[in-house]
Amino acid sequence: MNQSLTARAVFVTGANGGLGEQFVAQALERGARLVYAAARTPKQWNDDRIVPIALDVTDPAAVARAVELAGDVDFVVNNAGIAPAEDHSITTGSEDILGQIFATNFFGALRVAKAFAPVLKTNGGGTLLNVLSAASWLSVPTAYAASKAAMWSASNSLRVELQPQGTHVIGLHMGMVDTPMTARFDIPKTSAASVVEQAYDGAAAGIQEVIADELTRELKSRLGSTVEDLYGWAATLQLVPADS
Ligand SMILES: NC(=O)c1ccc[n+]([C@@H]2O[C@H](COP(=O)([O-])OP(=O)(O)OC[C@H]3O[C@@H](n4cnc5c(N)ncnc54)[C@H](OP(=O)(O)O)[C@@H]3O)[C@@H](O)[C@H]2O)c1
């Protein structure tokens, strides 16, 4: 199976965002023949190889329409996500915000994965890249972290279930990335370009889990320790400002 980007047809959700724009641009730099740039408000890209598509991942009809329009896709980047500023406590956060976060980061991402699975199968197996987070493994503590943990679990299930049809399922994990999502946090961040470069390198290499920064690699190495040790270590880090 061809795992590089050369001559692939790529579908990117949340394509107007910080990571989304990089997923679009770097796919083309790596030789993709076509990129479907799916966004709630599609923009003009002024490049014949980019096809803008209107897609809100919380809308099942819109996802079904996207699948009809993009039947040649063999690489899906499940990237759309939200991290509302109001979400800073799993204890006191409103059920409305919790619902919006799960509708996008879990149900929306899973809906896209399920809808494109038959397309990927028809097109030789292909690649499904789920954009997860360090928060899949360490609570911040937010509903966002819970949604990413749930999608991490679903990604592992998707990998097992789609393995017989030859689909390469990748989970991408990282901490703070410099995008509009994190503009409110004044702490060190990885560049979106670097994260996407590592994700596509991992895809080409056939890797199933890409960890795109040093702190997240250390976090992963500590998952075998006790919860006490893990959260004791986390308390020594400045993960997000206390008043975020
Ligand atoms: N930035 C980080 O530190 C970080 C770290 C770990 C993981 N991530 C994950 O990386 C992914 C991309 O985030 P980002 O940092 O690039 O943030 P971003 O710049 O805010 O981009 C997120 C994109 O998702 C789109 N989106 C939100 N809800 C949607 C919906 N219902 N349907 C379709 N698109 C929707 C947004 O569209 P609109 O333009 O219409 O709002 C936006 O373009 C997310 O899954 C995020 O959780 C980010």
Image: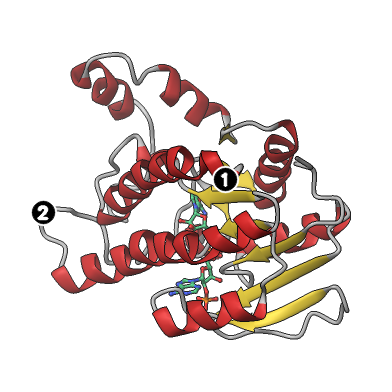
Camera-side mark, 2 or 1: 1
Bin the neighbour count of mark 2 within 10 Å (Cα to Cα): few under 14, some 14-19, many 20 and up.
few
Residue 76 seen in the figure: no
* Real-space Cα separation, disc 2 to disc 1, in angstroms: 41 Å
Give the residue drawn at x 50%, y 28%: 215
Ligand 1 under 8 Å from disc 1 Cβ: no
| Above-or-below relation of 92 to 172 | below
Residue 218 seen in the figure: yes
Q: Position of residue 168 (x, y in %)?
A: 60, 41
* Element type where label 2 sits in the image: loop
Q: Position of residue 35 (x, y in %)?
A: 76, 68
Lower sequence index among marks 2 and 1: 2
Q: Quadrant of the C terminus?
A: bottom left
Badge 2 vs badge 1, beta-carbon distance below 8 Å: no
In-front residue for pair 150/89: 150
Q: Label 2 amino acid?
A: Thr
Q: Label 1 amino acid?
A: Gln
Give the residue drawn at x 75%, y 79%: 51
Q: Position of residue 124 (x, y in %)?
A: 70, 51
Q: Is residue 29 left or right of residue 125?
A: right
Residue 201, by quadrant, is top right
Give the residue drawn at x 28%, y 28%: 235
Ligand 1 under 8 Å from disc 2 Cβ: no
Of the numbered discs in the image, which one, if any, rests on residue 165?
A: 1
Q: Which residue is mark 2?
A: 91
| Above-or-below relation of 27 to 52 | above
Residue at the far left: name it.
Answer: 91
Residue 22, by quadrant, is bottom right
Colouring: secondary structure
Residue 152, by quadrant, is top left
In-front residue for pair 168/203: 168
